[in-house]
Image (tube, rainbow, N blue to C red):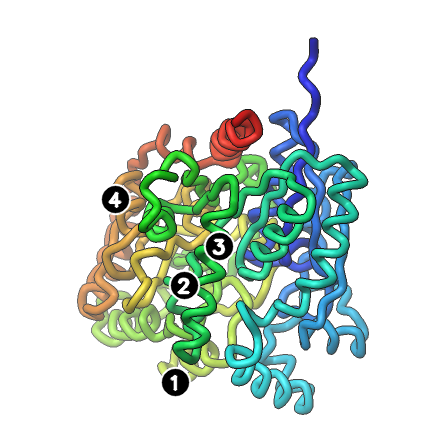
């Protein structure tokens, strides 16, 4: 007898038309889980103002996927109702603020006070609406399992509330750690204690927990050795179908050694960590002017463009702004060298950029710049390329210059562990998740 299709509700604040890395995991799970006998539905926010909108991601969602949108008191969501929605990708928030002074001032003030007023995060205003819609949907559609994806951590509190009300099994998925996330530090001892209590409640009440890498799993499992079998790693992965041959991206100066960085330089990751050593390579003559370029793909704050101007790199660095995912993938595949940058500091050992998995699929050598941690271990283990210590600009400059010399001599060396890379694909990782979820339902 044919096995009954299992129904799963994915709870993810970030989902198309919202783009960027936050939406990627939910989109890919919605696309791959049906191949393993699941019928996914998605509970997400009713879209408002956001710094990147990617309508192309909506094409990857199976047409039979039910998407439930819940209102939110998120200030940017409310502000979006007052603005005409963009038809394509929206500009970075900093650029938008420059054109809309009132919104810019509001955004900066809200960013400053949000950590004080919002628990566990600034998406707490989504909680009551999402819980109400989620409970109705779970009961009406006979959902078998709830799967909540952070960030925001509010997603897990929503899942907990639906689980308590319906008794449906629940798995909490951690793209990022919670109380050990040093990019989202609570402002006071009270906020820290509240977050730790909520995190403990989620980790103890959830029927299962998934994490995107070993270090985050280790942090979440701390103090719970008896639950080790209920805490598993499911990597972000890459979708091989995204890397089907397509038209090549535009390449100005195609004879130049092209290095591509995909992502956003966030608060702690100064673009100077990459661009200052590159400038030193040009000044010293190790790389002749006009012989190379760095392409930075993704939405950036004004700090990145200012760093390019300050270092006099306007002719050597291209800022594409936010690109739809398909175009971003094409840029990776056309690169001579792919760049990852991770700043040192507390929590840096947890970071593995989601783009690192796509770098694997692009089949191009990687230069990682960062401290010891999960990302460096992955680059070494899978033989993806080389690594430079982010705290040694001279080492970073030497690595960039060395890659340029290798390129001139026939190509940057690249001999990856192809089986290990295939294990990181979404088909393999979704298969691992499928087995874990079925073990939860069967227990």
Q: Is residue 416 left or right of 183 when viewed as pictured?
A: left
Question: Extreme top residue here?
Answer: 1
Q: Which residue is mark 3?
A: 201
Q: Which residue is mark 1?
A: 310
Quadrant for residue 256, please give it. bottom left
Residue at point 69%, 43% (across, down): 166
| Mark 1 / mark 4, whichever is N-terminal | 1
The residues tagged by marks 1 and 2 sit, at their Cα atoms, a distance apart of 36 Å
In the displayed structure image, the side of residue 249 where residue 219 appears, left or right: left
Q: Earlier in the sequence, mark 4 or mark 3?
A: 3
Q: Residues within 10 Å of mark 4 (few under 14, many from 20)?
A: some
Secondary structure at numbered mark 3: helix
Give the percent coordinates (x, y) of residue 132. 75, 56
Q: SS class of the residue under badge 1? A: helix
Tell me if I can see residue 30 in this picture. no
Quote the CA–CA distance across marks 1 and 3. Answer: 48 Å
Whether residue 148 is situated above or below residue 388 in the rendered picture = above
Please give the residue where the numbered disc 2 appears in the rendered image: 179
User: Which of the marked residues, 1 or 3, is nearer the chain's N terminus?
Assistant: 3
Query: In front: mark 1 or mark 2?
Result: 2
Q: Are marks 4 and 3 in contact (CB under 8 Å)?
A: no
Residue 75 location in percent, x, y? 68, 77
Q: Residue 347 at what x, y percent from top left?
A: 32, 63
Q: Nearer the viewer, residue 411 or 21?
A: 21
Vertical arrangement, residue 176 with respect to residue 269, above or below? above
Label 4 sits on residue: 380
Q: Secondary structure at mark 2?
A: loop
């Amino acid at each position: 007898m044919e096995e009954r299709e299992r129904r799963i509700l994915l709870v993810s604040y970030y989902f198309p038309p919202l783009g960027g890395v936050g939406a990627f995991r939910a989109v890919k799970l919605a696309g791959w889980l049906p191949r393993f006998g699941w019928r996914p539905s998605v509970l997400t926010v009713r879209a408002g103002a956001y710094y990147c909108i990617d309508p192309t991601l909506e094409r990857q969602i199976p047409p039979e996927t039910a998407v439930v949108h819940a209102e939110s008191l998120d200030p940017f969501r409310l502000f979006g109702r007052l603005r005409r929605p963009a038809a394509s990708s929206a500009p970075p928030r900093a650029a938008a603020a420059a054109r809309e002074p009132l919104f810019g001032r509001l955004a900066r003030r809200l960013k400053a006070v949000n950590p004080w007023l919002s628990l566990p995060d600034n998406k707490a205003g989504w909680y009551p609406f999402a819980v109400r819609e989620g409970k109705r949907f779970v009961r009406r559609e006979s959902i078998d399992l709830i799967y909540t994806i952070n960030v925001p951590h509010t997603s897990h509190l929503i899942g907990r509330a639906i689980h308590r009300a319906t008794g449906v099994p629940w798995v909490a998925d951690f793209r990022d750690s919670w109380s050990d996330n040093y990019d989202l530090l609570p402002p006071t001892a009270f906020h820290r204690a509240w977050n730790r209590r909520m995190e403990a409640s989620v980790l103890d009440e959830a029927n299962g927990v998934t994490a995107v890498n070993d270090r985050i799993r280790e942090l979440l499992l701390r103090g719970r050795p008896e639950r080790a079998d209920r805490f598993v790693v499911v990597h972000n992965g890459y979708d091989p179908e995204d890397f089907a041959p397509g038209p090549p991206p535009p390449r100005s100066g195609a004879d130049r050694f092209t290095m591509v960085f995909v992502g956003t330089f966030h608060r702690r990751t100064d673009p100077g960590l990459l661009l200052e050593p590159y400038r030193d390579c040009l000044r010293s003559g190790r790389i002749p002017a006009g012989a190379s370029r760095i392409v930075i793909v993704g939405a950036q704050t004004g700090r990145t463009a200012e760093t390019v101007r300050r270092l006099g790199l306007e002719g050597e660095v291209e800022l594409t702004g936010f690109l739809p995912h398909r175009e971003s993938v094409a840029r990776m595949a056309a690169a001579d060298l792919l760049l990852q940058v991770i700043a040192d500091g507390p929590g840096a050992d947890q970071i593995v950029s989601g783009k690192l998995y796509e770098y694997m699929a692009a089949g191009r050598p990687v230069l990682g710049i960062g401290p010891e941690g999960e990302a460096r271990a992955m680059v070494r283990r899978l033989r993806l390329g080389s690594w430079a210590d982010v705290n040694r600009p001279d080492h970073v400059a030497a690595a960039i210059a060395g890659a340029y010399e290798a390129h001139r001599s026939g190509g940057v060396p690249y001999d990856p562990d192809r089986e290990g890379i295939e294990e990181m694909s979404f088909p393999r990782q979704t298969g691992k998740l499928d087995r874990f979820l079925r073990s939860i339902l069967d227990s």
